[in-house]
Amino acid sequence: MTPLFALLFDSLDERLHLRAPGRKTANKVFPDHWSFLLGEVALFALVVLVLTGFFLTMFYRPSTDPVLYTGDSELYAGRVLPAAFESIVRLSSDVTGGLFMRRLHRGASHLFIGSIVLHMLRVLLTGAFRRPRELNYLAGIGLLTLAFAAGFTGYSLPYDQLAGTGIRIAFSELLSFPYIGDQLAFWIFGGTALTEAAIPRFFVFHVMLLPAVILGGVAVHLAIVVRQRHTQFPRAGVDGHRFVVGKPLWPIQFAVSTTLILWIGGVLALSAVLIPWSDVLIVGPYRPGEVGNNAQPDWFLFWLEGALRIFPPIEFGLLGFVVSGPFVAGIVMPGLIFGGLAVYPWVERHVYGLKGDWHVLQNPLDIPLRAAVILGTFSFVLLLSMAATNDIIAVLTRIRIEAVTWFFRITCLLVPPLLAGAIFRYSTRRLARRGLVVADAETATDDRTASEVVARQAR
Amino acid sequence: MAEQEPPLQVLSRRVPETTDTDEAIVVTAAVVTVIGAVGFVIALLLSSPLWVYGSLLAMALFALATGIRRYFAAGFPDVEAIEPRAQPVGARQDQDNHDGHDDHEDGATAGAGAIAEVHSVGRRPFLTRMLLGAGGVFAVSLLALVPSLGPSPGDALVTTRWTRGRRLVTSGGMPLRPDDIVTGGINTVWPEGAIGDEYSAVILVRLPGEAPQPPTRLEWVVNDELIAYSKVCTHAGCPVGLFRERDAALFCPCHQSTFDAARGAIPTFGPTARALPQLPMGLDDEGYLIALGDFQAQVGPAFG
């Protein structure tokens, strides 16, 4: 420590008594595996989103009133545009660093959602959701849903052609809700002139409400991890049930995290250079009654879009309300998937008669049900996502769109259960071949104390 | 590693004399809270003046405060306790006396369920429930502000701006005669005076070959080949913007709902289950295309 830093630290320490908690924090042990960093990637993406978001919010106008654009963009010179879109054109063309900030924000949003999905996949595959971590797992699923909502409201704000179409479909999805769908849609969208009223609403959701809830949720999520301590892979010589083994925060984990943050910053910056994220200027402003040919939402909603496309035509009355395709494909199906994922920890616990707490991660192939559920669910979601591009596939392969749609209807229905069944059988046989069964409790492998473990390793 | 939290060091303790008055006050406060909260909801939903529902909400808050205060004051001992400070830094004190004695270390709880050390005097489940109930009613009453977020749908989703005699105009505002429409072409048209009203968007088609067949309403077809349908897709509300000449198919780019324009726009493929409503169309005295009335089927996606 330099003298100046020592002086500053001491003056803080006199007032706040930092040494003991400081040492405890610095010595905190972090299990070491690359896949444990996925959550950190999401966290850093969130930081980028908030910081770039501050900048963007200073320029964005949440209104659809017609405004004359008088800036430098040749594409829109002298045109009357909706105020929200016009503010985006101005930010992109007439503000130094504006387009860069927009691309950083958009790129970070893709990274945010993508890393959350990968992080969830890691948690599911390795069993980090098992008791006592079920609550945190649920918090994570909640955060994923909020991230989807933030992404959707966010890319709707520029009010371009694609955004307006998406808002329209969201309104119709709300309408399809039983009994109260129409009133619910009018409350959330502010009325029937839905795209006009929607933009100020989405602004409040995206800039105030969702960030507040997400940041609170992340704080809770991290606090629980700190309190319960992180799970870890099995490690010879250390009883994982009783001890956490890994790298201390200072200096190693700090170095890893800092390096990771800077690498990710670099990747985002480079992506903003190479990839024209969110180039809404090419798409053009939303005009009522118009729709572009390639009407796709952002990638993380492809699975819902695909479901809407391939679902067979249904519309019938049931118990006094209308059951329609959008209701089943857009509300019931995702509800079942998220609900199924949410209850899975308890299902696994019940099916295998699990007991006690678990702190050591497992190989998913050792638990047949888990491997089957994960592969089945994710293959279903993946196939649905591919179905969202059925019109593009039809154009590229010159196969008729009807045939492509039928192909996806059949594969989405048959392939996931077949894959699930196949890996269930494979996993069961693999266990039998090795003479193993699914462990029903995580027990201490030995009763040595921490110092005994250390002494043994030193030898 | 179970660290026991030290017990509360009590200086003085005074057990209150709970009287019937105290009970009565808590019960009355709970009741007044509920009256105020429910009154707030009713006044707001009946569009009463601000001073009415504002005062009712204030009354509910004051009453809840009174009830909670009296519940604790009359039902729990008044306790004064001491807690050691961390080693304070005096004028001549050394700095190396920071020993890890940190009062805010996490420690296991001292025993099963023993978080609270100061307990209530006697058990009063009735009062507790009354206050919790009142608090709950109050919290829920705040939802009365939700209906302000948007209007009641009414018939906004059921009627459009099309009326008898209303001319069909282009997005630029020009009325149309039959000769203005190209064969096999489609036009997006609006009611005159309501250009851009989403639910009123109409697609005007000149059939390329085939004559229109039932279930097309032939009395709404002009010159045996000009038909107008609602442009709002009956699946999820996207504008049905594409037309395939070879089979006179209207095609929605969002989820590929396909409608047969020569047969009343009934769905032939895709996820939609309902035909596009046909606009009753005719000609006025000057030969311009006009509507003969509003749509007679549900426009756009299903609800309710």
Image (cartoon, coloured by chain):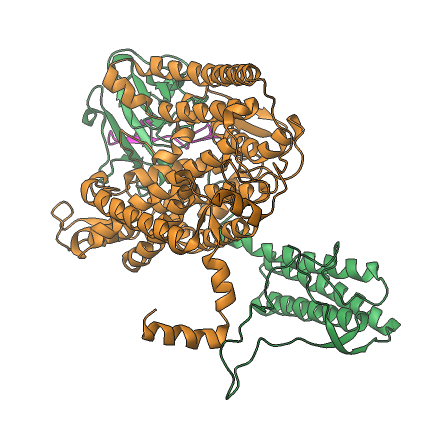
Is residue B277 magenta-colored?
no
Image coords of residue B72 (percent x, y):
76, 70
The image shows residue A194, relative to residue B144, as above or below, that is above
Quadrant of image for the C terminus of chain B? top right
Depth check: give the residue in front, B187 or A368: A368
The answer to whether A194 appears left or right of A364 in the picture is left
Q: Residue at x 14, y 51 (%)?
A: A78
Side of A341 where A161 appears, left or right: left
Can residue B165 be seen here? The reply is no
Coordinates of residue B55 in the picture (x, y in percent)? 63, 70
Residue nearest the observer in this picture, A19 or A358: A19
Does the rendering let one see residue B260? yes
Check if residue B300 falls in the magenta segment. Answer: yes
Number of residue marks? 0
Highlighted range, magenta: B282-304
Chain identifier for the orange-coloured part of the image: A
Q: Is residue A391 left or right of residue B17?
A: left
Where residue B63 sits in the image (x, y, percent)?
71, 69
Considering every residue shown, the one lying at the far front of the view is A459
Image quarter of the N terminus of chain B? bottom right
Residue B8 location (% of width, % of height): 72, 70
Between B102 and B284, the residue placed more toward the observer is B102
Residue at x 46%, y 41% (from the top left corner): A144
Q: Quadrant of residue A133?
A: top right
A306 w.r.t. B138: above or below: above
The answer to whether A245 is drawn above or below residue A58 in the figure is above
Image colour for chain B is green
- The answer to whether A346 is drawn above or below residue B43 in the figure is above
- Prevailing SS of the magenta stretch: loop
Q: Residue at x 45, y 33 (%)?
A: A121
